[in-house]
Image (cartoon, rainbow, N blue to C red):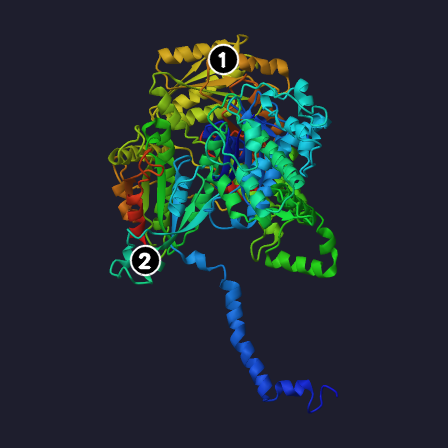
Amino acid sequence: MLDTFEILSTSGVVLWSRTYVPVHSYVINSLIREVLIEERTNKVAYGDGTTKPTYRKDGYIMKWNLAKDVGLIFVAVYQSLVHLTWIDKLIDNVSALFTGLYGEQLKGEIDTVKFPFDPYFDREMQRVEASNDASMSSAFEVTSNPEFTPPSSSGTDHGAEEPPPMPGLRKAPQKPIYNPDTSTDATPVPTPDTSRPSTPASRILTGKTRPGGKPSRRDRKVKAAVNSAPASSGDETSARKGKAGGKQKKNRVWNEFGADEEDNTINLDYSTVSANDPADFELPDAINPESWGRTTGKGQFVLKDLDEEMDEIIASVNAKKENSTAAGGIVGSSLGAIGGLFRNVVGGKTLTKEDLEKPLKGMEDHLLKKNVAREAAVRLCDSVERDLIGLKTNSFTTIESTLRTAMERALTKILTPTSSLDLLREITTVTATNRPYVLSIVGVNGVGKSTNLSKIAFFLLQNHHRVLIAAADTFRSGAVEQLRVHVRNLKELSKREGGEVDIFEKGYGKDAANIAADAVTFAKENKYDVVLIDTAGRRHNDARLMSSLEKFAKLAKPDKILMVGEALVGSDAVAQARNFNNSFGAGRGLDGFVISKCDTVGDMVGTLVSMVHATGIPVVFLGVGQHYADLRGLNVGSVCRLLMS
Amino acid sequence: MAWHDADSWLTLAFAPHPGTLALALLVVITLPILLHAYIYRRRAPDSLPTFLLIGPSSAGKTSLLTLLSHGTPSATHTSSTPTAASLALPITTTPASSRYRSNNDPSADRARKFRLLDTPGHGKLRHYALSTLAKTGPGGALKGIIFVLDAAALGEDAGAAEAGEYLHDILLLLQKRHTGNKTSKGPTAIPVLVAANKMDLFTALPESLVKIRLEKAVEEVRKTRGRALKDSGIELSAGDGEEEEREGLADGYEGAFNFKMLEDSDIEVKVAGGSVKGDKGEGADVQEWWGWVGEQL
């Protein structure tokens, strides 16, 4: 069942939450980190368009909704073993409700307000569940009807009320019992739940106290109903009684629901719920009878449900949404057009999809011209669009400039690495444990694997490390000889610096993974600091060639696997990065990219974005020339500037 | 009656008619007021002294913000956007600027107010904090930086490395702000408070150790940065050919890094312990941090 529902602001503050089973906060934290910040799309299972995307973590499933305009995240967490079909609806309704109710307060600086959202959530939960049940069995639709229908006899009332719709017990054979029409005097279903208060006692109108001792909110309501309509005939009493019963039943549904079998601490006991939950109590106290009910012409008192209010709010929020999408008609009139034009210059315009369409198209073309792969460009534009819709432009900024800054921010976010990329530091940490640091390089044919490997070796030698280069490219003729030449040159260059470099080779035709593993053992015995493993180039869409990488990762156990991609490649960059990232078996992926030949593309550095965007893996090095020293770290700011220029 | 007639509205408008004078006077008086109201309506909060909350993820920045703004820390998750809150010093702390003021002085309230800016600590989102810092001019409203860190996580290598790296970047920016200064009068100093949070935890390091660990971590970053590759900034933005000199943190000094080396650049670093959530029974312990904020106001 639902474990936790939380409403939090994007700044991280939990505004409201409902916990049925405590979930450690790292679960939601990882959702925010991996999905919302790092945008790792491979961790998210997207629905078929009608359902929300899901994210799994440690046996939990999370579904969420982002309300960008007010900066809220609505997250529902539940065990991945259960299948809840109504979660999407619940999240949608709750987001509409919450933004509708507290939209004004949310605009403040920081949300110091406590949100008395509990009753609304409870009702919504029941309704969603009930409508779900109704769709499963049409006979059950009485509960889903917010209007109370007077029962034909008190017997039906009992029947309708007795069986608690325990989630665990909601099975097909029990369905008929719920039906008030067919079972006039149903026997209570034997449930494992024993602490449930006996129904007849709780239904007595004088508001008998519950076993827990404290009167529940429902009792108070019933009491208030009696007090506010003192002159009542027997008929009315029974009607009201029925009403109270109907109310009770819904609440019962709720409470039993909370009382999951695994969870005997929360919500099982009425009294503890009321005691723990002051907001639940304050609401009925604060509301005077007129606001929650009205007296009909006959003197009957009709409860005005939260339902009505909630329906109104949801409807108004939805209507607003439709209005904003249909605003084109109004803006189409000349006055609106002039106003829109003016707003565009002066700022303060609320952005809609139509406003953004043209500039976004332009932005996409611009990115494509910068050699960003189409897939990445489209997704970047989409995410920027999602960010911007519903936002107000600042004063004296046009839509275009707003879009520009948003895109720059998105690019910065993508290219900035999550954790430090300090290679030297990692090497120091690893070598302190008496084993060599293993770095291997993979990539498509001819992108410059060996060249970049020797550049990295040169960089490490300058920092006085002992480097062993393993020639694990046993396939292409000349590969070993090429590395030998590199090593000879590097030896010459590093003689004065104090570094030391050697080659580990076993000739051609051998298994690359074994050579790599041997090289690591050899390095360990001879106290090398770093092992650099060169591999054969392979086409990323050739499953036969790629499959050997998995064995390679298992045997050599590299600390870091870098993939070399050339900046010249176009839209193939996405597929290359993705295929290589997935080829090392479960639990192992690439650790970074080396983008070579950056000096040949000028400002068309889109490949960087494509590769990082496809995998969420950072760019570690850039190759910017032919010399050993032409290796650079990535400067995110300058790359963004180049891309946006 | 045509417009050029002696008693037409146009003639009246230019004649020294009392009504015209009154109207002109009204316009002259109200227009500046209206303009002022329109333009400066939203400007007011900017002039409040500002403090920047910076630190690695899950150190307790947002919790601290909620604690300071409404007394109790709320439950929080990883932040993805920055947020700000207007706060006032508690009665028990006196801001440095009103040391000599009477407690009953009504204008003392104004001196207590300040703005706290919370920034996300996630690696990808640090540009919010860094760009705010980079934008601050020589005499900005930024009065100080509160670098929050998890004193318990500092005991582990990974935690120390992350905190050290972030702190290094911040300090380097501050130092660049000082060295890049063009005028003879230096920019207003931005002091740094290292707020060692979660002191209530058993594994938390005490204040003195926090300082030593942090200095060591910054030293490591400083060492590797000095030897690391140049970044691609110059090569890629081709044309200007301007070889930018790389500036390291506390360049002129020999030996291991310590916070005293930064005093030349007018950066004062203070380490103070505290806890936002507090021990189970007792409340939060942020008195020392409040005191520091009071000194800067």
Which sits in the foreground, A73 or A547?
A73
Q: Position of residue A123 (x, y in %)?
A: 59, 37
Question: From what the image shows, is residue A130 above or below residue A522?
Answer: below
Look at the numbered disc 2 and give the secondary structure of its residue: loop
Kind of residue indicated by mark 2: Ser
Question: Do the residues at pointers 2 and 1 share their chain?
Answer: no
Which sits in the foreground, B132 or A567?
B132
Which sits in the foreground, B105 or A356?
B105
Neighbours of disc 1 within 10 Å: few (<14), some (14-19), many (20+): some
Q: Is residue A50 left or right of residue A456?
A: right
Residue A92 in which image quadrant: top right
Chain designation of label 1: A
Residue A430 in which image quadrant: top left
- Tell me the mark number nearer the camera, choosing from 2 and 1: 1
Q: Is residue A391 visible?
A: no
Count of number-bearing discs = 2
Quarter in which the N terminus of chain B is drawn? bottom right
Q: Position of residue A480 (x, y in %)?
A: 50, 15
Residue pointed to by mark 2: B184
Look at the numbered disc 1 and give the secondary structure of its residue: helix
Question: From what the image shows, is residue B31 above or below residue B163?
Answer: below
Q: Are marks 2 and 1 in contact (CB under 8 Å)?
A: no
Residue pointed to by mark 1: A554
Neighbours of disc 2 within 10 Å: few (<14), some (14-19), many (20+): few
Question: From what the image shows, is residue A531 above or below residue B293?
Answer: above
Q: Is residue A502 visible?
A: yes
Kind of residue indicated by mark 1: Lys
CA distance separating discs 2 and 1: 61 Å
Chain designation of label 2: B
Q: Position of residue A234 (x, y in %)?
A: 65, 40
- What residue do we see at 44% from left, 31% from top? A419
